[in-house]
Amino acid sequence: MKIDSISNGVVIDHIRAGKGMELYHFLNLDNMDCSIALIKNAPSQKMGKKDIIKIDTELDLDLDILGYIDPNVTINVIKNGERVEKFHPQLPQRLTNIIQCKNPRCITSVEQEIPHIFKLTDREKGEYRCIYCESKAKN
Ligand SMILES: [Zn+2]
C-alpha cells in the first residue's frame, strides 16, 4: 500500500498529535485485516503536528464515534482514488460502552452485563446522560 494513495477507503486527517492510537483502538482497527496506516506527528500548517489514519478498504464503521473523541478531525472518503466526501464527524446521539456511569447506585454499576449507554442531551455543550439514571457524563 502506498501511503499517499489509497483507492477505496477512509482517511482520518487532522487528528490531534498523539491521539491517533486512541482513535485506532476506539475504532477496533486491530481487528481488521485490510491495510491500515497510522501516521504520527505529520507536519501540519494548521496544527503544527497531527496524526493521520488511512484505512484501505470500504468500511462500514460508525465514524460518528470520532465526533465524541475529537470533533475536529476531518474524514475523507476515497473512492477509485478520488476524494468523494469530506466532513467533520457529528456528536453521536448515543454512546454504547464508550464511557461508564460513575453513579454507584446506577443499575450499570450493580449489574455487570448491562451495556453502558449514554444519550446526547445537549449538543451545544456536548452533554451526555446515562439512559438509566440520568447522571451526567463527566467530560
Ligand atoms: Zn447511570
Image (cartoon, helix red, strand yellow):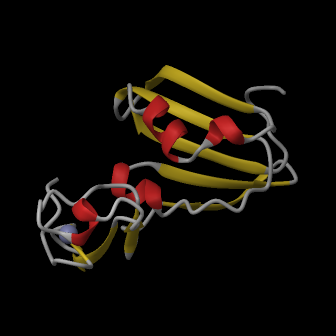
Count of numbered tags: 0
Residue 128, can we see it? no
Quadrant in which ligand 1 is drawn: bottom left
Position above or below: 51 against 65: above
Residue 30 seen anywhere in this rendered image of the structure: yes
Residue 104 falls in image quadrant? bottom left
Residue 88 vs 36, above or below: the answer is below
The x, y position of residue 114, in whole percent, is 39, 68
Q: Is residue 61 above or below residue 30?
A: below
- At x 45%, y 54%, the residue is 66
| Residue 112 appears left or right of 135 | right
Front residue of 34/130: it is 130
Q: Nearer the viewer, residue 12 or 135?
A: 135
Q: What is the x, y in percent for residue 48? A: 35, 24
Which quadrant holds residue 46?
A: top left
The location of residue 74, given as percent across then percent down, is: 49, 51
Query: Foreground residue, 126 or 84?
Result: 126
Q: Name the one closer to the observer, 120 or 115.
A: 115
Query: In the image, 29: left or right of 112?
Result: right
Please give the name of the residue rendered at 14% of the width and 56% of the height, measured from the top-left corner: 138
Residue 96 left/right relative to 122: right
Which residue is at 38% across, 76% downward?
A: 93
Q: Residue at x 11, y 67 (%)?
A: 105
24 lies left or right of 33? left
- Image quarter where the N terminus lies is top right
